[in-house]
Amino acid sequence: MVKRNILKVGAVVLALGLVVVAGCSSKSSSSKKTPADIAPMELRTVATGTSTAAAAKGTIFTCLPLTMTAASTPWASNGIIDVSKIPTVPGSVTMESKFEITTTDTQRLLVGNGVPNHPIGTFPIPPGTEAYKYYSALPAGGYANAAEIPVGPYDLQLTIPKNPTVNATPTCFSGLVTGVSTQTGASWHAELAPDSSANFYDPNAALPTDLCFGHPYNTQYHYHGYSYKCMPDQGNAGEQSPMFGYAIDGFGIFGPLDANGKWITNVQLDECHGMTSMIPWDGQMVEMYHYVINNEYPYSVGCLRGTPGTMSHDMMTH
């Protein structure tokens, strides 16, 4: 049996009555959480010397081992990112978003064009803006510099198990995509950003992003860090955060609040940035493993507890 859940957005967003403010959606019901209810004033970033060679708390696990470097920018110091000081890529650009989930008895197929259903910054980044100077210092294949990269649609196809299982040992990331938001139709990428000397940084500490903590790589828009503030459904006040999307192994990616509406920290999470608790899953409450997105590096998925699904070639798999 095949079921479909379709999300197609462009001008349709306004027709549905969603009011978009500064790149995020808000809802009129006082019982609903808003981005301000879960807004962290700071992000806790990665330290110089942190390895990605193994699954561990506070890092990511990459199949090609790397060593992280702490970025030195006006908004990042001593392991803390001051969100209020991050320059923002300006603009509020709406593009056509297409996203569809098809389910069978054993699989989910996520298909779309990779464009989110909310406004994004202006890419290419306008010269003369604060954000431009950071990107213009970086090389980009086919462009004069990284500031010149536009956002465009691409072939997003991810097939994942409908009922994923936890493997005995975690799996490393062989590509950039870590998950896809079912609320917006855009993907999350691994929290890595190289400079021209092949040093690797937390992107949130090294580069400005737009108001939804997104930017393009090879024209593909994707999220980092505090992207969850732009998820249309933040859930109900005093309750567990809802699911924001699926990781590439099929497990859910949930927001930062537990069943009592309390903030979830890295201390409570395992080496892949996940935990097992009661969550809503396919219409039922079940005790199940899931990932949590919060304000501590690596912010969402740090490694894979399940078996990776299959992705289209266009989806930054290398």
Image (cartoon, grey):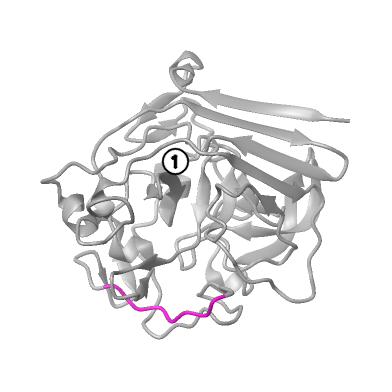
In this view, the residue in front, 155 or 35, is: 155
The mark total stands at 1
- Quarter placement of the C terminus: bottom right
Q: Residue at x 60, y 39 (%)?
A: 182
Q: Which residue lies furthest to the bottom in this view?
A: 49
Q: Mark 1 points at which residue?
A: 230
Report if residue 149 is visible in the image: yes
Percent across and percent down for residue 21 are 34, 31
Side of 29 where 254 appears, left or right: right
- Quarter placement of the N terminus: top right
Please, is residue 249 above or below residue 60 in the view? Answer: above
Q: Which residue lies furthest to the front in this view?
A: 142
Per the image, is 81 magenta?
Answer: no
In this view, the residue in front, 39 or 143, is: 143
Percent across and percent down for residue 99 are 59, 32
Are there few (<14), some (14-19), or many (20+) residues within 10 Å of tag 1?
Answer: many
Q: Which residue is drawn at 55% across and 49% down?
A: 315
Q: Residue furthest left?
A: 128
Percent across and percent down for residue 25 are 43, 32
Side of 261 where 115 appears, left or right: left
Please, is residue 47 above or below residue 109 in the view? Answer: below
Per the image, is 65 magenta?
Answer: yes
Could you say whether the residue bearing mark 1 is in a helix, strand or loop?
Answer: helix
Amino acid type, label 1 = Cys
Q: Residue at x 34, y 58 (%)?
A: 41
Q: Residue furthest top?
A: 15
- Magenta part of the chain: 64-71
